[in-house]
Image (cartoon, helix red, strand yellow):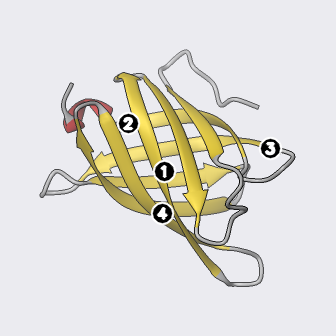
Amino acid sequence: MTVDDLVGNFAISGNNQDEDGSSYSGTLTLTVDVNKRIIATWTIGDSQVQKGTGFFKNNILVINFHYKCDTELTYKGVVVYKCLTKDILDGFWSEKHGNPKYLGEERCFRITNTSKKIN
């Protein structure tokens, strides 16, 4: 598998980095820049946008991400995905100011013509 195999859109389903592991869903778009680095954009729910950049090696994808919350504070973190196939990513993540006792989790499934967003 190469970094170019990961380019595309994915439906995501995850659990937050908190005691309750509250769930979320949305989409992830992956593109590649001229240096073969990953450019990622998540849309959580219908409106929260998170962006990141990362790299791919040995079927592992690592992305540093950031986003602004409703109060305009910027949050930063890192997500690590094991690329099970080019269509299925299994990951975990942590934010700098998240609860250090927990990790967030996220699963990504490539969106094809017959796929739909996970609700």
Tag 1 residue: 79
The mark nearer the N terminus, 4 or 1, is: 4
Q: Residue at x 41, y 22 (%)?
A: 87
What distance separates the C-alpha of mark 4 from that of mark 1?
Answer: 8 Å
The mark nearer the N terminus, 1 or 3, is: 3
What distance separates the C-alpha of mark 3 from that of mark 2?
Answer: 27 Å
Mark 2 surroundings within 10 Å by alpha-carbon count, few (fewer than 14), some (14 through 19), many (20 or more): some
Q: Are marks 4 and 1 in contact (CB under 8 Å)?
A: yes
The mark nearer the N terminus, 3 or 2, is: 2
The mark lying in front, picked from 3 and 2, is: 3
Q: Residue 33 location, x and y as percent? A: 21, 56
> Which of 96 and 76 lies nearest the eye of the viewer?
96
Q: Residue at x 12, y 57 (%)?
A: 35
Point out which mark residue 21 bears. 3
Tag 4 residue: 65
Q: Amino acid at mark 2?
A: Gly
Q: In the image as oriented, which residue stretches furthest toward the left?
A: 35
Position of residue 52 in the picture relative to residue 26 (left or right) = left
The mark lying in front, picked from 2 and 4, is: 4
